[in-house]
């Protein structure tokens, strides 16, 4: 008998691969990092790690599979992480390699150099990592993980700079791609964002003696830190004592923040550009209602990520908002491989239709995105089986037609529904009465660009929708990936 | 260093103590029970157990602390539970005894009788259990648990009936209080509700060969069973093969279903009296907006239990609904005892204010109930600290002024805020601009009683609000509990 | 791939089913019990349990599968067992039920009576347990375990005596068979041996304030207790404060101590009748060399149980003693079920031949007993494969031809090699040059009876060799077991 | 309450730091390695690791703390180690670093090179590792462990050889010290011993298709492999398919096999130089009886390591051999740090005196060595407390006066009893009637050198007794260690 309660994975979602957090100037810094990582858990649920430094015991590290709350709340773990300086990391596994991920792939990575140790946590993805790795191995480096981020440590080891901050600069100047890095030496907390600023990173103040770096502002809130400012694209900050030193180590480049952070990745209570992510998402719903109205009885979110846009859609359209689908709040992450038959049952474990409410109604379902489309089909089935009269899907992002190479786990292009079908074909394949995506311009408007997308100089990285990659994905090109033909 | 990420317990909520589930007539029945218990996890998160029967191996049992998803998804556990007949139970610990709860207190309980074995799972609370236990021990029974429900098994053992179903009747006729019981013999699945029908129990059909009993309809949905009907107050059903035999073993009594199931315990997608619980809760919000309107900019639920009423309040009042407070979806159940300082920090681990949204706004917060009031104070602090201009609390239940003795974990009366303070005093103690509870009549109206509460013959058990106990709490009276003076 | 390192069970040995230990009058009594049980681990390796009593927290219990050293050395377990009074138990599973043994079968058993709680640990076996169990269930008792020892608790519950010590007497007067019982109430430590005194039990003094009861004297040594005396057959001692009260509750009967305790079960450093068990076993080797001499180059023990007799054999015969077979001291108890092919390999995991020593030699192997004979064959194969010229087996006990019903795990009679074969047939089946068992008279002489066995009134229970059962095995007879025909 | 059953560590013994094992040419090679490591467990009990290679899944690795039998018998671990080529390692922690040992220090170590991967397991100690490590870090290598053996991998990475076998040679030519290395590439199993051959390594044949390398012959016995020959000092064998290629990569040096392997480290059933280790140890007892006779009643071994020498002493002296001290065979390895008071109690947990045997007797105790002397004192206390008339210690090795730098965990010199006291002073400090060590010449004679030790060209490394180090301990000299002054 095979147990069949399983598969809580959001299999049909794009996945942020990482969250990073660091703290300096507080007693038991690792406790703060644990809290910060807990707040950033949505950015990576597979594993987490914390490194701390204490003058008596040096650098200490703990890396674990599973949730922060299950690992970094235990006294016997936290006692091994003393000191007033610590950094941490949460991660997803990368596409296709779930089984192979070993604990040695879990960050932060650590290197012992002649001038002392340095730990590094990286959010993003390096687009030339394969080439760098090959070169480094040929020159005598021993890689301990399958993670591309380990290149940074080996590049530092090869640097001839006398100073660890300078070695970080040396190393990051050699890498291409997207990175928000939090690093620590024995005395310094360091934060860096790549020149395009693809991934987020913010600075916070803890009382009057400490500092924090976090992927998102929600990581500051949980420890009661005050939001100071975003680290800017291309900026490096080195924090020691009360001093925050800022430099610009990289060739300047246009800012291209990931627009999917606005749509899905970031937590709704995080603040981007002075506005809550929730508000941007609600505004997406408003735009969507304007662009693609439809007559119906209820507007229901696909929980939980479709909720803000559904609220906005309801407010703009005047159609009542309702919880037509209920999420089981006790779903977790289990490691049992589901059988095929259970995979198909998967959605029922996590979601249930509020059937007495739905029966006989024309229902608008608002979801954040369509990736493979498999979940959308199952949800449609559930809603129809419960007796809905009509089902209309409204999607809070444009069709996802291109893979991301900057730190998001995307299926290969051929598996993206929008890469092979038109909107109408998708509607028919999913089997709903109507299916509409927000336009790219509408999305930009909702994100605060009143004029929509400037095709010459788009404010965001929207490669997953547009196929326009701001940074050439050189490893992938070498493997044969074909970029969109220039028009 | 003591780790301080902890305390996800909803410390300031009333807690349902149990959920029960049973299945007959399907291969690997224990798998279905695991799914059903997973859907009922909100009714009890401390521990769970499953008993199954297979002709080859007899009765088998597994009882574990923790979530269903963590215990009853493992092949090595489920393989020990073969057979086409199984029942299960999820439970909270009872008030004050958290530390002392042992695995032997986890149901189902099992007894071997001369005519064969019988397993029993009980949702509710027996009000004369202490007296029964004393009597049984004096007559030579050995109790293995501290659970009152074990009395049922010993009463069965003392019965002179030749038949297990008859022995269950004998036993249940001796107990007082609230009970929805699911039991199994080698061939029969049995369901019983007490004469007042305080706790829920429903019957479902699995394809054309199996049957299920579940505390709520959401347990039927997850296994794809069809909802047949509620087991009626005072009814006993004995299911064998395709036959469902119904009897009425108890003296008839007026139906007094627990109204707090409507307010908080049951899942919003469950169906009670033909209407979704969600809809009843939304209607509570509508009633509340009519009874206690206030000018404001936003209506925000205290997640997640306040959500339906907040939607209703917004729809009735026209004030926009917004997610002003965000719940960390990765909170779980940890076993670390939090320090006092962290207990106070507790709410921040679970909830965060959407500060960019709240700042400068007049905010209406809708919560399901106020028990001790401690959570309400913390939420108020968070909202004000984020810069709200005004904070108005609207509560989707009347003041909780009396303890429950029918299967809900309530603080002793002196710790209930409403037992010692008027509404205005509570408002001042919590520190908000206004605080209003729905009236008892309003709650009855929302629950479908257009005329409100009939003081002569109330349709529900509302003892926690009214102090009118439909079943005398005899053990508690013996201990000195003082009932409300007759008026 | 199936791992094949496994099966450390001594599959071809008779197994003592239990060891008992109790302590009163010392701080943290459970720690002393853990030590005592560790010293008695050879009497039962499957599981262990400890119950302690402290006025603040009442009776506390911990029961675990596995070794004492792995379970009862952990602070988080031992902290749950406070108090100055504690008892404990180690056990083997009974024949054929390995898979079915549940933690609820692990002793001590506990009962809550109207005059207070009582815990009981039992070494031995009740020969009328099945009949008692049936009767008790019919009268309304609920059994929680499959252990026969639980009858004692239920018989106590049915007693009308006001006093727990008296209830123990009542209960034990109803049972038949072999028992050495250690029990405790809130204030008393109690020890009892059946009228024949089949199983051992000794009394020790801890400094000038405490007392200990132990199955063997080695349990006293480990805690530094002074050996006072053996509890006598048919005696009950009740210890409270500094007072040891002795009574004789049972009808007097001739003493029939288990002779296999001398041969194999008891530890060689334990003292029985004023002489070390080691010395008795060495003397068995001396007798064996006198009875069955043979020319050879080396005398080698089958480790570890054959060692003392091999030393005696060497000393009497003048043939050099040598370690021809080496035991891997890192064998433990694992729970992996071995495949058939590995079972056959089993002996190599535990034992290895000292091949450079054995090659070309005539070897006498001294083992304690032959049960199924399977191990003897494998050892013979190993020795011959290593190049021995001749192999002679000398066995330190008579042929084991009858099952034990008094607390030893024996195969059914048909599986005992000596039940179906003569000594010569056994020699041929095992495939050795000679095979000789000590005579029953020789064994009695070695055990201190200079005149050998008195057939009219044998001093020991030797039923496994003689088929003469001092206590009628009534449950077994009811099942159809055939006793040896009277001659 | 602190549990006090603990400390099974042989605290007062020298400890071998490692055992290595490798297999090629058999299905599920990792299973064979697990068995081999189990047989070598006495060489290292802290942790173990296995690496295997399968063409489908590449190199796989599992490293665990604890016994082989507890980790590498589990299906879920072994299934991750497929393939017909595997190597493994068991290890002790090095002196003083117990707490700090991390799983990343557990071998085999693995490196990915441009021509493929290579795993290495090392028994021994590199005497210039600190200098090498410093140099490698300065040149850009990132160390992942605190183990000196990791240098080998980094030296390989720096080699310009195109072939992994050649890179191993390059690397090992740079290291100084003692090493027996087992390594593997995707197709080859490789074994190497340093030029002096300090640590053992043997070659075995598995049926007609496989090969094994093992630290000792007992590792061959357990898998049924046939002993072929010892790998010679300075030899490297590269095994692929049926071909064993032998080369001599190092400058020739005189053979200096560790004499303590004869005295204590190797298992008694292993074969060194055609003779069983047991026989050599028995012969030590014979020599000792000749050199230092004494009148007594009994010769008792300190179990288990003193047993063979005690047998020899008894046989030479004619004084009866007896088991005066019994070892608890259920001692294991626990991780609880014992309190000081329990450390003192430690010996009683593991050893117990056979008091009925010892009382009034003159006892000769034979032990393998005296390191700190603390255990000897405790044993003497036990024996006297049991009533012995006289206690005479006979030690099967010369006084241990110098630390080992070649792979054995020795206390610093000041803590070695023999470094600061004469034999008479030691006798008085331990408190026995006489104390005699075997002479260095006597030890050589027992080990097969009829003429005793050739001071010009000793056959063994006996630095721990003589202070004559065959390989200069350069790291230690740099730290200030003072070698014995030349005479």
Image: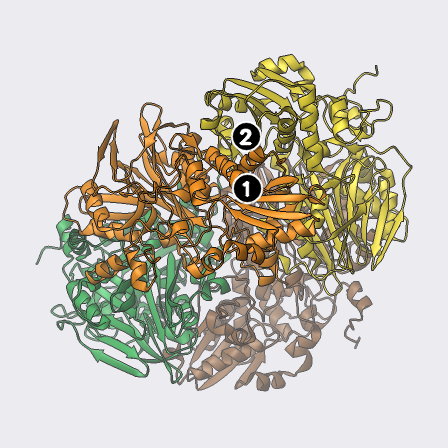
Chain colours: A orange, B yellow, C brown, D green
- Give how far across and how far down residue D405 sits, in percent: 21, 58
Residue A316 appears left or right of A219? right
Q: Which residue carries the number 1 mark?
A: A304
Work out which residue is located at the far left of the displayed protein and give it: D487
Check residue B322 in the rendering and tell me which mark sits there, or answer none: 2
The quadrant in which residue C352 appears is: bottom left
The quadrant in which residue A43 appears is: top left
- Give how far across and how far down residue C3 sits, in percent: 48, 68
Q: How many numbered marks have been drawn onto this rendered protein structure?
A: 2
- Give how far across and how far down residue D37 sits, in percent: 39, 67
Q: Which residue is more in the foreground, C397 or C149? A: C149
Crowd rating for badge 2 (residues with CA inside 10 Å; few <14, some 14–19, many 20+): many
Q: Residue at x 66, y 70 (%)?
A: C411
Residue C208 appears left or right of B237? left
Do tags 2 and 1 sit on the same chain? no
Pointer 2 chain: B
For the C terminus of chain D, give its image quadrant. bottom left
Mark 1 residue element: loop
- Give how far across and how far down residue A384 sits, in percent: 67, 51
For marks 2 and 1, give the one nearer the viewer: 2
Q: Is residue B209 visible?
A: yes
């Amino acid at each position: 008998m095979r147990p069949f309660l399983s598969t809580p994975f959001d299999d049909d979602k794009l996945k942020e691969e990482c969250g990073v957090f660091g703290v300096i100037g507080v007693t038991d810094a690792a406790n703060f990092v644990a809290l910060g990582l807990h707040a950033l858990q949505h950015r990576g649920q597979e594993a987490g790690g914390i490194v701390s430094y204490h003058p008596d015991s040096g650098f200490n590290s703990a890396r674990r599979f599973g949730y922060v709350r299950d690992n970094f709340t235990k006294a016997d773990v936290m006692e091994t992480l003393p000191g007033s300086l610590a950094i941490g990391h949460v991660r997803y596994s990368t596409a296709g390699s779930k089984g192979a991920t070993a604990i040695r792939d879990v960050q932060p990575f650590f290197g012992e150099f002649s001038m002392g140790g340095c730990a590094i946590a990286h959010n993003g993805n390096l687009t030339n990592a394969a080439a760098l790795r090959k070169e480094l191995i040929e020159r005598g480096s021993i890689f301990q993980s399958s993670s591309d981020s380990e290149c940074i440590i080996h590049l530092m080891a090869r640097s001839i700079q006398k100073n660890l901050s300078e070695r970080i600069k040396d190393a990051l100047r050699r890498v291409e791609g997207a990175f928000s890095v939090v690093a620590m030496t024995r005395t310094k907390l360091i934060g860096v964002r790549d020149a395009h600023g693809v991934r987020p990173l913010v600075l916070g103040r803890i009382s009057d003696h400490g500092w924090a770096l976090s992927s998102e502002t929600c990581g500051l809130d949980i420890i009661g830190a005050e939001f100071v400012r975003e680290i800017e694209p291309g900026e490096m900050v080195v924090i020691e004592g009360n001093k925050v030193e800022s430099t610009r180590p990289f060739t300047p480049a246009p800012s291209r923040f990931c627009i999917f952070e606005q749509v899905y990745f970031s937590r709704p209570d995080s603040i981007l550009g002075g506005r809550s992510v929730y508000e941007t998402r609600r505004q997406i719903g408003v735009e969507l209602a304007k662009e693609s109205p439809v007559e119906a009885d209820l507007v229901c979110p696909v929980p939980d990520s479709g909720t803000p846009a559904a609220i906005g859609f309801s407010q703009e359209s005047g159609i009542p908002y309702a919880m037509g689908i209920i999420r089981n709040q006790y779903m977790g992450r289990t490691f049992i491989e589901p059988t095929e038959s259970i995979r198909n049952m998967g959605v029922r474990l996590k979601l249930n239709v509020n059937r007495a409410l739905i029966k006989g109604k024309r229902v608008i379902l608002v979801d954040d995105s369509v990736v493979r489309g498999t979940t959308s089909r199952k949800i449609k089935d559930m809603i129809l089986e419960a007796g809905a009269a009509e089902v209309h899907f409204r999607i809070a992002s444009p069709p996802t037609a291109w893979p991301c190479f900057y730190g998001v786990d995307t299926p290969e292009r051929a598996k993206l529904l929008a890469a092979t079908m038109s909107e109408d074909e998708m509607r028919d394949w999913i089997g709903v009465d109507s299916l509409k995506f927000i336009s790219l311009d509408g999305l930009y408007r909702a994100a605060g660009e009143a004029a929509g997308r400037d095709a010459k100089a788009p404010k965001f990285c929207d490669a997953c929708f547009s196929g326009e990659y701001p940074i050439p994905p050189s490893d992938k090109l070498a493997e044969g990936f074909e970029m969109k033909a220039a028009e």
